Amino acid sequence: MELKINDYKLLCNKGSANFNEDIIGLSPYGAWVLDGATGLNNKNLVSNESDAKWYVNWWNKYLHENMKRNDSLKEIMKDGIDEITKEYYKLIGDNKVESLDFPSCACSLVKFYEDKIEYLILGDCTLLVNSKGIVETFKDDAISKLDKKVYDYMAKLENSKNMTFNERKAKVMHIIIENRLKKNTIGGYWSLEFSKEAIDNCVSGFIDIKDNTKIMMTSDGFSCAYDRYGIFSKEEIINLANTEGIDYIYKKVREFEKSDDNGVEYPRFKVHDDSSCVYLDIYK
């Protein structure tokens, strides 16, 4: 017997920036959440909107076309890196490019098999799995730890309460750049970019599906409801997705952020981050 989807809920909402650099996908063969990150040199080399938006859209199309392959997620993603690297360098032409220019993304991917799912996670996207009432979390915490250093520095800035988000971010940009230069390095963090080494260092594995299993895949703009803001516990968030819907959780996050609209109590890089979630109720 093949896995069946009893119920699903999808959400992918833009934050306070000009473009939504998240994207989600669901097919008969798998599902994914991609959270894009534009280069820090403020250049758009391959898009009139956002290089990160171009990047996640490319991967979304690729995954829709390739998730049905019999290969593992790691093999599928490594082949994709070969393809997108060629296309990226073809598009930038003679433009000089530095590592800080590269678009990249965090991702949470699952692939369906007859009696199990395969998962692959890079960056700060999350996978929650609820089986028999026990909620397991699958995530790489490296980016969250690096971001915390920035947030802690923000909180200590003199006259921080009277600064705008952009003014506060400018004060910590040297730390943000320092952190970004640790991308896809040992001791730094791993992200989906143009490096196959990242795939070798991803969070990955298989989960057997024996009973009804609830899965929640999120970008950090959604998972902050439990892992940063503490509005809900991880058990509550996946149960609420089933009973109230994921839009209910999203609205609670936005309400919370509006109550701290200058980012004083909870320092962050923007008023609202892009927020994405794929919720699946699956069974054999």
Image (cartoon, rainbow, N blue to C red):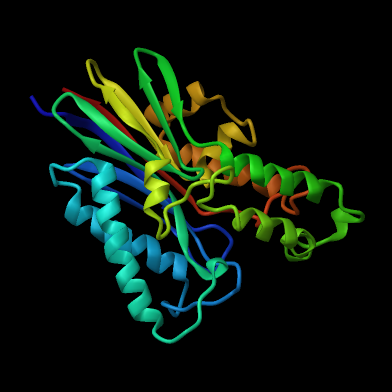
Indicate whether 91 appears above or below 59.
below
Residue 65 quadrant:
bottom left
Q: Quadrant of the C terminus?
A: top left
In the image, 256 versus 207, the foreground residue is 207
Q: Give the image location of residue 236, x and y in percent.
A: 50, 23
Residue at the right extreme of this rendering: 158
Indicate whether 66 appears above or below 1.
below
| Residue under the image location 86 percent in, 54 percent down | 160
Residue 144 quadrant:
top right
Residue 204 quadrant:
top left
In the image, 76 versus 127, the foreground residue is 76
Q: Give the image location of residue 40, x and y in percent.
A: 60, 67
Q: Give the image location of residue 188, x and y in percent.
A: 58, 46
**In this picture, residue 109 sits left or right of residue 65:** right
Residue at the left extreme of this rendering: 1
Q: Give the image location of residue 248, x and y in percent.
A: 48, 38
| Residue under the image location 72 percent in, 62 percent down | 173
In the image, 105 versus 25, the foreground residue is 105
Residue at the bottom extreme of this rendering: 94
User: Is residue 188 at least partly visible in the picture?
Assistant: yes
In the image, 107 versus 250, the foreground residue is 107
Indicate whether 265 appears above or below 78.
above
User: Is residue 11 at least partly visible in the picture?
Assistant: no
| Residue under the image location 35 percent in, 30 percent down | 215
